[in-house]
Amino acid sequence: MNRDDAWSRLNEWMGTLADLDGAAAVLEWDRETIMPPGAAEARGAQLATLAGLRHRHLLDGSVSDAIDVVAGSDDPWQAASARIAVRERQRAERVPESLVRALAEQSSRSVATWADARPAGDVDAWLSEVGPLVALTREQAAALADGGDPYDALIDLYEPGTTYAMLDPVLADLAERVRPLVDALAGTGGPALPTGPWDEDAQMAISLEVARDIGFDERRGLVGRTAHPVTMGLGAGDTRLSTRVDVTEPLSCIMALLHEGGHALYDQGIPEERRRTLAGDAPSLGAHESQSRFWENHVGRTPEFWEALSPSMAAAFPEAAAGLAPADYVRALNRVERQPIRVESDEVTYDLHIVLRTRLERAIITGDMEVADLPDAFDAGLHELLGVTPATAAQGAMQDIHWAAGIFGYFPTYTLGNLYAAQLAEAAEAAVGPIGAVLAEDGPAPLLAFLRERVHGHGRVMETPELMRQATGSDLSADPFIAHLERTYSSTSSLS
């Protein structure tokens, strides 16, 4: 088989994988947005069927020779696709199709139960579905680990090549450096915004405006509303992102939009002709989270961002926003506060939430903790790390969708994303100028162009550490992140 024929065969095989992934994503998006509750069982079966078909296709032996030939290509996109194919097939060989189907079905059932149980704080209902899902996830982890550390095997699904032994010192060091900042800054910033009401439809309209402003292409995607914000790539030309709405305050809606918008811009920045290949994606979730945290924190918390958005806020909310100046939004947004909800946390306290979840999910997967003990352990751990105890189960272990969906090993990527985002912000300022000045003069476009060139356009050609090293000029380090916190929050506290 010559190189051209091998690449043609590999493309055909990867295209089918992409189509199966896209079909599953459509069903998942529908589940998170408009699916009626009574469809949960059938939806689980549908997703299980697609997961089984994907697993079977992934292991198709007829493509083996093509992968071997393409692996020697001097085209970096082709060689990367072959490398990823080998890795994914090796993983798939360790996990039986029956387990793949069972995980997909139980995950869908668990998410549907979580969506109903969370508002009511019904821990028993949540645990009744998470328990069986954890059992299946432990089985998956053991199969993937092949005698190694089961939690490492799950981390590797989201951050290839990374282990808990590599992450733990990073998280421990970050916690040690952040906790004194929390002690010094807790209570600084400004008062919360007026409780409104902030019209829900107007919040969604503002969100769409923000998405357009940062460069989201509506011809190739849409913005929706869900209980837990999410971004999904449903295929080339179809990127969906969502945000949430709270009638008592609009900041969580806008910041969630910026966070998910960062993911969506990454998805839309992958070259279209590469989208149906295995290299046509981000190399890891840490890389993806670097984009969401860049837009959320290094753009969305700046005075210049709010200078530009404030007129639209005043027009959309003539009563709730009456008399509010841009500085009021910045002070409210950058208030440092010990609070239980991760997705509403400020930058200073956020990573302590990740430290807790990483420790807990490792204990769950290794069997050092039983699922029934998770709610109490969560509350105790949050009090120890952050000095706050959740008032309800919905503010505790039930607050995130991840465990209800069987997603273990993902949480550490948020902190990696924070660290990489700070390094990218430094590199962007060196390349195009101070972020605030760029926003004031030219808006977000130069920042998006920088990210397109340095990150998005490379897909999975490189692994994340090398991609970020080339993009920023340095290896992973917490120093830029800590410097960003000290600089931003000392300045914000002076406004209070």
Image: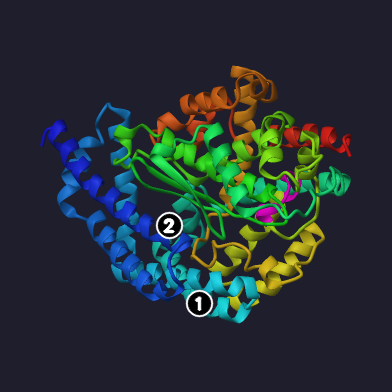
For the question of whether residue 303 can be seen, the reply is yes
Which labelled disc corresponds to residue 129? 1
Distance from the alpha carbon under mark 2 to that under mark 1: 21 Å
Q: In the rendered image, which quarter contains the N terminus?
A: top left
Q: Identify the residue at horizontal 85%, vertical 47% (top origin).
A: 191
- Dividing the picture into quadrants, the one containing residue 459 is top left
Residue under numbered circle 2: 29
Q: Main secondary structure of the magenta part?
A: helix
Q: Identify the residue at horizontal 44%, vertical 38% (top origin).
A: 218
Q: Identify the residue at horizontal 63%, vertical 39% (top origin).
A: 419
Residue in the foreground of this view, choosing between 356 and 128: 128
For the question of whether residue 96 can be seen, the reply is no
Q: Does the magenta stretch include residue 150?
A: no
Q: Is residue 11 shown left or right of residue 409?
A: left
Q: Identify the residue at horizontal 41%, vertical 66% (top origin).
A: 140
Residue 75 vs 482, above or below: the answer is above
Give the residues in magenta.
342-349
Q: Name the spot of residue 179 as percent of width and height, x first.
A: 80, 49
Earlier-in-chain disc, 2 versus 1:
2
